[in-house]
Image (cartoon, rainbow, N blue to C red):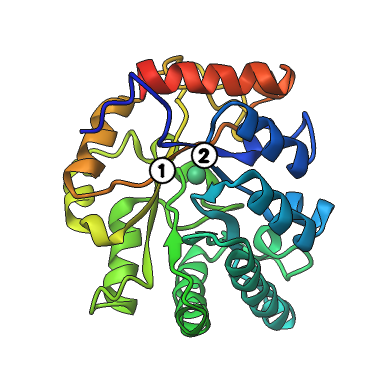
């Protein structure tokens, strides 16, 4: 297992972590100031400054990307399906322009939440089917663009509105069916927030293997958690055994950036430099 106590060379900041404190260019500059070598931007933050400016800012700061957030929201009614496909192809193109190593997929839940305006449904089984069909469809395009897709299982509390793929096992079953040859075009983004509770976690990480572990996200699970979306904890403040999970992914050969992704009203209300400095400190003690 890599020693993170001496430096933060393997730290990446997911730019949602400080999204309220500045635009993407300001975040990139702050990361560079703190010696952070990688970021993972969100599409809306890129759109706000413009793709060209985002590409330039990343390049000028000499940063790597650890991923691009995010494609997906595949579940739609018939009237919104073509738009969802176009949108996902654009996400692949943007990821490529930015030099991301993978496009993270949050797959969507029921159609009315995944693609607003779609006819409402309660059929999660239909959503599961559609997610798999649409990943298969996007995979062809992503392959030709050389952009790996990183499927992120989300905690089951998000099944209806954000992602109906909720466990490592479910995500890996999809990978096995769509990419049985393990080509590297499809894998997982493992986020401790979403999977720390899973009694199969270690076994499924071993099943994934290094070639399917495309991204590793950290934050912490607070007890009690007071908001379903915006109460993620700083590493070390909650109950997730982050070092044990990191040890498991590194045992399989994962040697990439460890991405700090904290969506939190509490941390959004702190100055950007303070949040980044805290991420760096905790990276050395709690990751
Ligand atoms: Zn994540």
Q: Quadrant of residue 221?
A: top left
Q: Give how far across and how far down residue 138 sits, in percent.
A: 52, 79
Identify which residue, 143 or 202, lies in the foreground.
143
Q: Is residue 139 left or right of residue 70?
A: left
Rendered position, 177 above or below 164: below
Tell me the crowding category of disc 2: few under 14, some 14 to 19, or many 20 or more residues within 10 angstroms, Cα based: many
Which residue corresponds to the image point at 79% horizontal and 40% vertical from the top-left?
Answer: 23
Residue at x-position 52% and y-position 49%: 64
- Viewer-nearest residue: 159 or 99: 99
For ligand 1, tell me if the residue under mark 2 lies within 8 Å. no
Q: Quick one: SS at disc 2?
A: loop
Tell me if residue 252 comes above or below residue 282 in the rendering: below
Image quadrant occupied by the N terminus: top left
- Where is residue 251 drawn, in percent x and y? 17, 43
Label 1 CB less than 8 angstroms from ligand 1 = no
Q: Residues within 10 Å of mark 1 (few under 14, many from 20)?
A: many
Residue 114, visible in the rendered structure:
yes
Asked if residue 94 lies left or right of residue 184, the reply is: right
Query: What residue did someone put label 2 on?
Result: 37
Q: Which one is closest to the eye, mark 2 or mark 1?
A: 2
The alpha-carbon separation of the residues under discs 2 and 1 comes to 9 Å
Label 1: which secondary element? loop
Using residue 251 as the reference point, say whether residue 74 is left or right of it.
right
The spot of residue 246 in percent (x, y) is 28, 35
Q: Percent from the top left, x then y, of residue 2?
A: 25, 32
The residue positioned 34% from the left and 34% from the top of the image is 196
Instruction: Name the residue: 46% across, 14% down.
Output: 237
Residue 148's image quarter?
bottom left
Q: Is residue 234 visible?
A: no
Callout 2–callout 1 Cβ contact below 8 Å:
yes
Q: How many marks?
A: 2
List the residue tagged with mark 1: 257
């Amino acid at each position: 297992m890599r020693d993170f106590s001496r430096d933060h060379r393997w730290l990446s900041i997911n730019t949602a972590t400080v999204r309220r404190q500045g635009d993407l260019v300001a975040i990139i500059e702050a990361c560079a100031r703190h010696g952070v070598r990688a970021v993972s931007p969100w599409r809306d933050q890129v759109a706000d400054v413009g793709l060209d400016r985002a590409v330039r800012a990343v390049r000028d700061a000499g940063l790597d990307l650890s991923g691009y957030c995010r494609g997906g929201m595949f579940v739609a009614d018939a009237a919104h399906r073509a738009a969802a496909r176009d949108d996902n192809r654009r996400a692949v193109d943007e990821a490529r322009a930015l030099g991301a190593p993978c496009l993270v997929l949050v797959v969507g839940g029921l159609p009315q939440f995944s693609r607003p305006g779609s006819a409402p449904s309660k059929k999660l089984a239909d959503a599961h089917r559609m997610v798999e069909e649409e990943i298969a469809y996007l995979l062809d395009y992503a392959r030709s663009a050389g952009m790996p897709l990183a499927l992120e299982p989300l905690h089951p509390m998000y099944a209806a509105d954000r992602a109906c793929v909720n466990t490592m096992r479910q995500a890996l079953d999809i990978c096995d069916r769509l990419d049985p040859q393990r080509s590297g075009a499809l894998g997982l983004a493992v986020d401790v927030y979403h999977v720390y509770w899973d009694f199969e976690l270690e076994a499924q990480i071993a099943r994934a293997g290094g070639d399917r572990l495309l991204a590793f996200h950290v934050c912490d699970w607070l007890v009690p958690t007071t908001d379903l979306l915006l109460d993620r904890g700083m590493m070390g403040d909650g109950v997730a055994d982050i070092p044990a999970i990191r040890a498991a992914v590194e045992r399989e050969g994962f040697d990439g950036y460890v991405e700090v992704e904290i969506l939190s009203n509490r941390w959004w209300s702190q100055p950007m430099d303070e949040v980044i400095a805290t991420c760096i400190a905790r990276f050395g003690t709690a990751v």
